[in-house]
Image: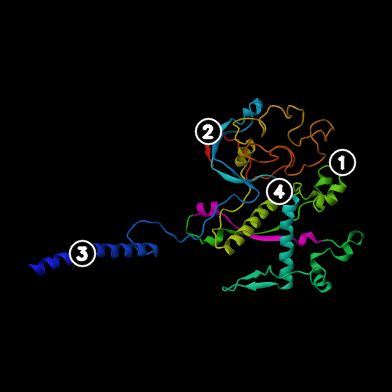
Amino acid sequence: MTAKNHMSTTTRASWPLSILVLGIGLLLGSCSGGNTGDLIGARDGGRWLETTPYGMVYIRQGTFLYGQGDQDILFNMNSPLKNITMRPFYMDDAEISNAEYRQFINWVRDSIAHTILGNTVEDEDGNEYINWKAKINWTDPAVIEELEDLFIPENQRVFGRKEWNTPRFVYNYKAYDFSSAAANGSGRNRNEFVEARSINIYPDTLVWTTDMAYSYNEPQTQLYFSHPAYYDYPVVGVSWNQANAFCDWRTRLLQSYRQSKRMSLGFPFRLPTEVEWEYAARGGRMSSPYPWGGPSLRNNRGCLLANFKPGRGNYVDDGVTYTAKTYSFNPNDFGLYNMAGNVAEWTASTFDESPVPLWVI
């Protein structure tokens, strides 16, 4: 009887202890990533941080009427309004400035210089990369002599000025054609859809005189892109291919930083589609003709609300003679500046006149 009672007591006393030990084991097992038999999801993606990129604003999802406003009645006969559903995206809050594009120019120039000087390193796989920690001494005559091809040949210099040989500023990159890859199925090698591109990225500074030959714009041709006074003004003379090359460079610049911090790469930069641009320009307004609503081009004090050609020869009525700074005038309801007037802006696609009633972007 005594032994039985003792056994029973011992057995009962051991249960809470056993459960406690088992519970600690399960807790330690779950913390160490062991298999618990539960659906907990994969945890192999690394650190994830998706913040609004610098200089951009978040364009919320929504619906808007795509096409011309009601006042363009005749044009609407060929282009009926249609309801468009938009997913959210990020967009630069202002036009790309001369200073921002010059960062691209300088990066390409320096990358060429580093390559010529042999300032490169190899990774563990044998791939060669530019060693950006190495400094280029642009005042060293020996260095300048070695980088001679980056400057205009002496027999072509105007007034003897030593200037950059901008045709050498070529950006090489590769783009993957997802549409062709999807259309051709999975039977072909994926590398067949990689397109190598080489783009001269220096803007056409002569547009000031070629596009507006009736005006004395030689000072703009010589100074607009290079003078510090214009650094905060929108870059002009950039082709569609150059704009796409800029987007690729900007993507790789940010991804390189993210990789160094072991962060997720994020989405690539690109030009907005024509539909995205119109949706962003409207600023959440359904069918207004201007980013600020309308119908007037002026506020209640008579001031113009954007950089227009306001009158016959009266180009300064809006406060500027040529282009305005990228952050001029008031932004629309999405926080975007100069979505009307100032300079033309590239989009990834063109206006579509098809009468499709609903188009999900």
Q: Which residue is mark 1?
A: 215
Circle 2 or circle 1, nearest the eye: 1
Q: CB under 8 Å between callouts 2 and 4?
A: no
At label 4, the amino acid type is Ile
Q: CB under 8 Å between callouts 2 and 1?
A: no
Circle 4 or circle 1, nearest the eye: 4
**Label 4 crowd bin: few (<14), some (14–19), many (20+), radius 10 Å:** some
At label 2, the amino acid type is Pro
Task: Say above or below: 121 vs 183.
Answer: below
Circle 2 or circle 3, nearest the eye: 3
**Label 3 crowd bin: few (<14), some (14–19), many (20+), radius 10 Å:** few
Q: Which residue is mark 3?
A: 13
Residue 138 percent coordinates (x, y): 80, 68
Q: CB under 8 Å between callouts 4 and 1?
A: no
Q: Earlier in the sequence, mark 2 or mark 3?
A: 3
Q: Earlier in the sequence, mark 2 or mark 1?
A: 1
Q: Earlier in the sequence, mark 2 or mark 4?
A: 4
Task: Say above or below: 170 vs 232.
Answer: below
Task: Specify the segment rendered in magenta.
Answer: 164-184
Q: Which residue is mark 2?
A: 357
Circle 2 or circle 4, nearest the eye: 4
Q: How many marks on residues?
A: 4
At label 3, the amino acid type is Ala
Task: Say above or below: 170 vs 354.
Answer: below
Q: Which residue is mark 4?
A: 96
Is residue 200 visible to the viewer in this orientation of the structure?
no
- For the residues labelled 2 and 4, the Cα–Cα distance comes to 34 Å
Residue 295 percent coordinates (x, y): 69, 27
Secondary structure under the numbered disc 3 in the rendered image: helix
Q: Is 192 on the left-hand or right-hand side of 143? A: left
